[in-house]
Amino acid sequence: MLDNAQTPPRGTIYIEDITPGLSRSLSKVVSDRDIELFAEATGDCNPVHLDDSYAKETFFKGRIAHGVLTAGLISAVIGEQLPGHGTIYLSQNLRFIAPVRPGATVTATVTVLELDLAKRRVTLETIASVGQTVVLKGEAVVLAPSRKIG
């Protein structure tokens, strides 16, 4: 569930309206149920995500959310806000910097770095954070919708 206090804009920002520096974000509390559903959907049932006793004995000293679950919030920003509906993901690189604990509020932020108007490509900085701690950082390239091409 998104933070109701800051409901993000939804829809499409066409390539013709995108400028470097444009940014959008969303925040979500990562729940135990989110982690369980992600494990079920992907088959990634690593006990560091699901078993308190096991996870306490690991490097992390407790359970953590799947890194790619956190990265999914970046996808939500791209698909719903910037550029939004009609966007095609072309590539994404990620660096996982810090763990996300169950119950943490993750803020995913996408910022336009570069545009290639002729190819409709947008390069985006992608960051996820918990409070002031960056937990994930990367860069995505997407094909943005255009008013000129349906």
Image (tube, rainbow, N blue to C red):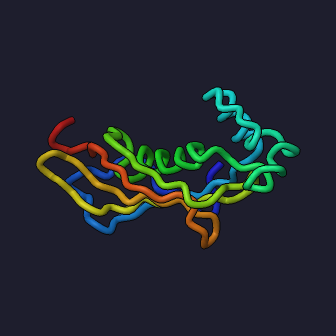
Q: Is residue 24 left or right of residue 106?
A: left
Q: Position of residue 6 (x, y in %)?
A: 58, 63
In depth, the one of 61 and 102 nearer the eye is 61
Q: Residue furthest right?
A: 53
Q: Is residue 25 visible?
A: no
Residue at 63% x, 54% y is 28
Q: Residue at x 31, y 48 (%)?
A: 141
**Residue closer to the observer: 98 or 125:** 98
Residue at the spot x=45%, y=51% of the render? Answer: 94
Q: Position of residue 39 (x, y in %)?
A: 68, 32
**Which residue occupies 69% across, 54% down?**
29
Which image quadrant is residue 131 in? bottom right
- The answer to whether any part of residue 85 appears in the image is yes
Furthest residue toward left: 118
Indicate left or right for 21 with 41 as reference.
Answer: left
In this picture, is 86 found above or below 5?
above
* Nearer the observer, 105 or 44: 44
Q: Hey, which quadrant is residue 134 in on the image?
A: bottom right
Q: Position of residue 2 (x, y in %)?
A: 62, 52
Quadrant where the C terminus sits is top left
